Image (spheres, rainbow, N blue to C red):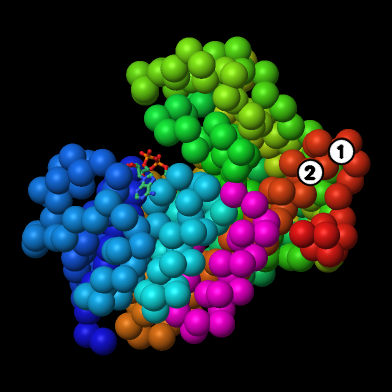
Amino acid sequence: MQEVRVAIIGMGIGRYNGRALAATPRTRIVALCDLVPERMEEFAQELPNPVRYYTDYIQVCNDPEVDAVFVGTPNQLHVPVALEAIRQGKHVLVTKPLAESVQSARTLVDAAEASGLVAMMSLSTRFADDVQYLGALARAGDFGEMYYGRARSVRRHGIPAWNLGFILPGGGAFRDMGVHVLDSAWWLLGMPQPVSVLGVAGAKFGPRGRGYLPGAVQPPETLGTLYTVDDYAGGLIRFDNGAALQVESFWASHQPSELQIELFGTEAGARLKPLMIYRTVQGVDQDAAVNIALDNAKTWRTIAGHFVECILDGVPCQAPVRHGLIVQEMMEALLASAATGREVRLDEMRQVS
Ligand SMILES: NC(=O)c1ccc[n+]([C@@H]2O[C@H](COP(=O)([O-])OP(=O)(O)OC[C@H]3O[C@@H](n4cnc5c(N)ncnc54)[C@H](O)[C@@H]3O)[C@@H](O)[C@H]2O)c1
């Protein structure tokens, strides 16, 4: 294969991934799929070549002129769409979270790994330059043993309501935004195996019609009655190497908005925003500020470029869907712990689900 012919499914976040894929060498967007034709027509105007339109994801997955599919539908449709693509022999790039449940995430990962196709997560926080820089330091051993992490994603008024997938089962704040800092912090800690999770979660704003993103589509009045998911979650994840990660996400709160990851190592520590490295050298504390200009469009291009090099050059995938499954297990264990009031052991959860 000389060139990857890509279909974009879902014209929300799909436009960001689509722009990056269109700008990637050896890549062409050949088809778009969405329930709303106007969204496809509008996005198609940005593309350098004509594309085919589909409103049925089964049909686009069956298009023989498509090699790879980006999945950007609401959470509850990630696995049905990605599974259909894999069944039809297409490589897949899936937005976060991988799925709406552990069971469906596992079904997808099993199918993807059996297929030999590239099945990658599109992770805009993990692939950002600041997180990648910390990852390079961590892999080089600069932090020594990494034994603790804190990760939080807090919004003051940030409940999305432009599609119901966000607030129906399988949605919620933790799967929507907690997933980013959880994935990145877990990756920075070296992806240790999670053993158990203790969590709390609830909904203090959404059901009362409060906390929605200002300026965005405002919720219908009936939304409060449909609201079945968390708008906050927090907890502690223990890993098999003795490390632990404290994680929190709030779609809405009476707190300043913040996205933060803090790393504790035996030789150095770090904070993501603003990016700082803390060490003690010759008995003297060193607080080093690291200046990395962040560029969201570049992050999407990094993801797109890696997806294409995995397909065309056989480069090992840095963010396979198996990572998405392990993150999903941690998320679902935390939400299950919140529901039952008990610590959830991952090995026990795997036996029943
Ligand atoms: N930084 C990120 O990685 C990031 C950011 C935003 C959203 N997301 C993820 O993207 C997903 C979608 O969120 P969004 O904000 O783009 O929502 P959105 O509503 O803007 O876009 C989703 C699109 O999917 C289309 N769609 C729904 N059902 C479909 C179907 N059966 N077939 C084809 N198209 C269908 C909708 O018409 C809509 O245009 C969510 O899972 C969300 O978590 C990721």
Q: Is residue 201 above or below residue 143?
A: above
Q: Do we see residue 299 in this rendering?
A: no
Q: Is residue 160 left or right of residue 15?
A: right
- Magenta segment, which residues? 100-121
Instruction: Classify mark 2: residues with Cα within 10 Å, few (<14), some (14-19) or many (20+).
Output: many
Q: Is residue 216 above or below residue 44?
A: above
Write the residue at 59% across / 70% down: 109
Q: Is residue 336 left or right of residue 303?
A: right
Q: Is residue 3 left or right of residue 187?
A: left
Q: Position of residue 20 (x, y in %)?
A: 27, 58
Write the residue at 76% across / 65% down: 193
What residue occupies the far right of the structure in this picture? 342
Q: Is residue 274 above or below residue 281?
A: above
Is the N terminus in the top left, top right, bottom left or bottom right quadrant? Answer: bottom left
Label ID, residue 340? 1
Q: Position of residue 252 (x, y in %)?
A: 58, 22
**Does the beta carbon of the residue at mark 2 sit less than 8 Å from ligand 1?**
no
Instruction: Look at the numbered disc 2 and give the secondary structure of its residue.
Output: helix
- Return the residue nearer the eye: 308 or 287: 308
| Marks 2 and 1 close (CB-CB < 8 Å) | yes
Write the residue at 29% across / 48% down: 34
Q: Do we see residue 116 in this rendering?
A: yes
